[in-house]
Amino acid sequence: MAVRNEDIAAVFDEMADLLEIEGANPFRVRAYRTAARNLRGLGREVAELVSGGADLSALPGIGKALAAKIREMVQTGNVRALERLHQEVPASLEALLHIPGLGPKRVRALYEQLGVETLGQLEQAARAGRLRNLAGFGPKTEQNVLELIGAHSDQQRRFRRAGVQAHAEALVAYLKQAEGVTEVVVAGSYRRGKETVGDLDLLVTAAQPGAVMERFGAYEEVAEVVSRGPTRSTVILRSGLQVDLRVVAPENLGAALHYFTGSKAHNIQIRRLGQQRGLKINEYGVFRDERRIAGETEESVFRTLGLPFIPPELRQGSGEIEAAREGRLPELVTLADLRGDLHLHTRDSDGNATIEEMALAAKKHGLEYIAITDHSWRLRIAHGLDAGRLLRQIEEIERLNERIKGIRILKGIEVDILEDGMLDLPDEVLSRLDLVIGAVHSRFRLSEKKQTARILRAMDQRYFSILAHPSGRLLLEREAYQVDMPRIIRHARERGCFLELNAQPKRLDLNDSHCRLAKEEGVPVAINSDGHNENACANLVHGIGQARRGWLEKGDVLNTRPLGGLRPLLAKTMG
């Protein structure tokens, strides 16, 4: 079985969770979490480094002990230390971790203080009102737990799109090697760029379908073959991801790709539009009576309806067909449009590279400017900067800007928004910066009224440029906090500040509907990597996908502007 960085990172995350349930040393827990994050952003598969005999302990955040575990997993597919933890921590407790909002600390409290060990026991305890008396819970948390248990079954089989990407790319490359294959394409919600996917849909054109089916079933990561037919097969990978494969005729590929890409709402609207024209549209083509008139390409399908090509990301049934008919389709932003990255961390807080290393890596990727925005001091777990350390960093950035050519380093901070809406550093320090990013990192469970007021008050501070990851969600881990996002967006327009689309695959925050609302309100969105290492730019493509789902064009994105156009906009937010 091929072991990828995402597989190892998932193991390290799991070990951190289990160790935290056991009450292990916080530094040990943090080491696993840091290693997992670094592996996801490495940009090269560590399995290749292992096969080449490289010293893994030279990697950021990877000491000798973790390097040994990485080699063990690459070579055996397992980590004995994880197996020991599985023996020590009841499996039912691990299952509780899949409930959003129940982290390891809360799971441990439930187990030690209430004897809650299973999902059923958790539900009983919540219904009996026993959770509210635990520290860190309360009546509202109790109600949230009940709601999340109800929603849990709908999320069990979902995966973050970024985590599925490696599987998709590997499967496409693998199937292209089958005899007689001419095309292998990914369809479904993955192609639409949806944040999470339930399964993976592959379409193949091939002269010999049987050879494709044979090769598909023999893929080394297949754990179970659910079904297999002459042209359709379904498998479950070791990761739990379901993959559906269909072999289609070349002349049907466009119709099939359209059919298996669009959402249900989009496809229903397309079929109705076809019926109005006397056409039948399905995965095999476009038909007038019994005569097939289109289907080789997606463009041909749209053309029969008098429509231009609709990008996959827009095929949600949310106005894209009307926009296409009226010539109002957006010219969606692309990765090549980005000129800079306005949210980056370094070793000065919780990153793994120096300011210079981050700048040179961004320059290598073609960016013209970056902003260094380490955490402020209140976020102790991230080794945040106090006023003195930030002032020293400002001086270092000024020296680097004199020496490094071809990229500009902007001076910034990711400052905590406190519960009262004040910022974590004084104005006299913030005034020395080029931009200030405000972020909520605590008190996620305030009421919508209080959370909204908190953020509005922060946006009204003298120095405030960008609201970071505005909803606070972590995909499949933590729900968004309660906030009146339309009001936040309108206030950003009035205040003249901006919103972030955080491109971290776990966040992708703003969501697509809020991106679209920001566009309608004329509030530019900054697509930022929130990167912590030299491979930060790899995150930007995920943010671009989310922006495209939100109908954003180049002009809607703050950091598509050249530095000369960006500086005046930032200056207006700084006092």
Image (spheres, rainbow, N blue to C red):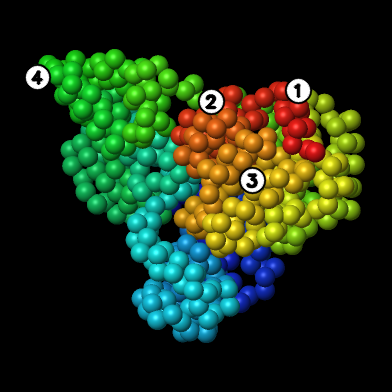
Q: Which residue is mark 3?
A: 468
Task: Tell me if label 1 and label 2 are in contact, CB under 8 Å.
Answer: no
Q: Residue 321: give x, y in percent of width and height.
A: 33, 25
Q: Earlier in the sequence, mark 4 or mark 2?
A: 4
**Amino acid at dot 4:** Glu
User: Which labelled disc corresponds to residue 134?
Assistant: none
Q: Secondary structure at mark 1?
A: helix
Q: Which residue is mark 1?
A: 564
> Which marked residue is nearer to the observer: mark 4 or mark 1?
1
Which is nearer the eye, 168 or 78? 168
Query: Residue placed at 44% from the left, 69% from the top?
Result: 143
Query: Residue placed at 60% from the left, 33% from the top?
Result: 523
Task: Tell me if label 3 and label 2 are in contact, CB under 8 Å.
Answer: no
Residue projecting furthest to the left = 290
Quadrant of residue 164 within the rendered picture: top left
- Could you tell me how far apart the alpha carbons at marks 1 and 2 are, in whole angstroms? 20 Å
**Amino acid at dot 3:** Ala
Which is nearer the eye, 178 or 163? 163
Q: Which residue is mark 4?
A: 290
Q: Residue 141: give x, y in percent of width and height.
A: 50, 69
Position of residue 337 in the picture relative to residue 413 (left or right)? left
